[in-house]
Image (cartoon, helix red, strand yellow):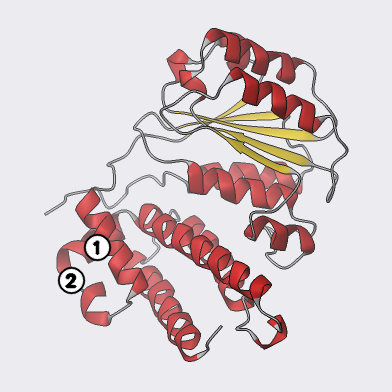
Amino acid sequence: MMENSASETSLLSPCISTFGQFISQNRMPHALLLVQESGADLTALSTLFAAWLLCQKPTSSGACGQCRSCLLFQAKTHPDFFAFGEADTSTGIDEIRGLIQALQQTAHQSGRQVVILQGVDHYMPAVANALLKALEEPIGDVVYLLLAQRRQRIMTTISSRCVKLMIPSGEQLPTPVQEQLKQLYWKPELAAFYEPELQEWMIAHPQEALAVLYQLIKERVTELTHKRLAMSNPSQAFSLKPFLLFTDEIVSAMKQASLPGINKLLLMESIFFRWQELTALSRKTSL
């Protein structure tokens, strides 16, 4: 049985809130450094931020999910979005040079370009210096999202040119629990949701549980988008709008989960029942 303090500090909500303030106040830094030293995967969070930055009609909680820019992003065909590397490997110097060359072209959609660079703490000196040059000589409205797990291994000159968003270390999501969550989300059954140990973990770690669902929904939307594009008459396909709106609900729930006095069980139940409805609806409609 997993034991955790009821007053557990949210891992993601403060970071999302800070980013939202940058968006609403129109003071987005040129480069953000996201560090999670406990080794958590920051892919979902950085992807959420990238979509938010590129959205043509951003909301207070994230991308609208409906504008042309959002649809391109969901289909993984957005011309102004670039992503390189993995959490534990270094990006090659030729990739960084190619990126800089690509960024010199005019942005296609919102006028902003977004770059996600993972594993910055693994960069070799030559790669780090190439990135440093890009940060020192920004091209147009480009936002860099740099991801790392070990802050002390990042070149100081790179770190000093970024606004840092430190995500506190927390208990990691055990693989068996993660697999249970995935199975629950893909086949949402009440009996599985109320399994004592899994429910206790979800209530103690709502942000992590919601992040798993958020990532799965993004993957599902991408899959459905590709199917729609391949259809002769996409207008007859199942609407993606409910899924896109639901991602906003998840982001909102992640913020609410850190509020004092919030009933996390009711919050998680509400999200779970909503997801159950969407799953049932999508199964009734063939794409």
**Residue at position x 43%, y 86% in the image:** 280
Observer-side mark, 2 or 1, equals 1
Q: Residues within 10 Å of mark 2 (few under 14, many from 20)?
A: few
**On the rendered structure, is 93 left or right of 119?**
right
Query: Can residue 73 be seen?
Result: yes
Q: Which mark is residue 195?
A: 2
Residue 207 sits above or below residue 15 on the image = below
Residue 219 position within the rendered picture, expressed as x and y whole percent measured from the top left: 50, 61
**Which residue shows up at 85% across the image and 31% down it?**
140
Which residue is the site of mark 1? Answer: 180
The Cα atoms of the two marked residues, 2 and 1, are separated by 10 Å
Q: Is residue 182 above or below residue 235?
A: above
Q: Is 14 left, or right, of 105 in this rendering? A: left
Quarter location, residue 197: bottom left
Under circle 1, the secondary element is: helix
Return the residue nearer the eye: 134 or 227: 227
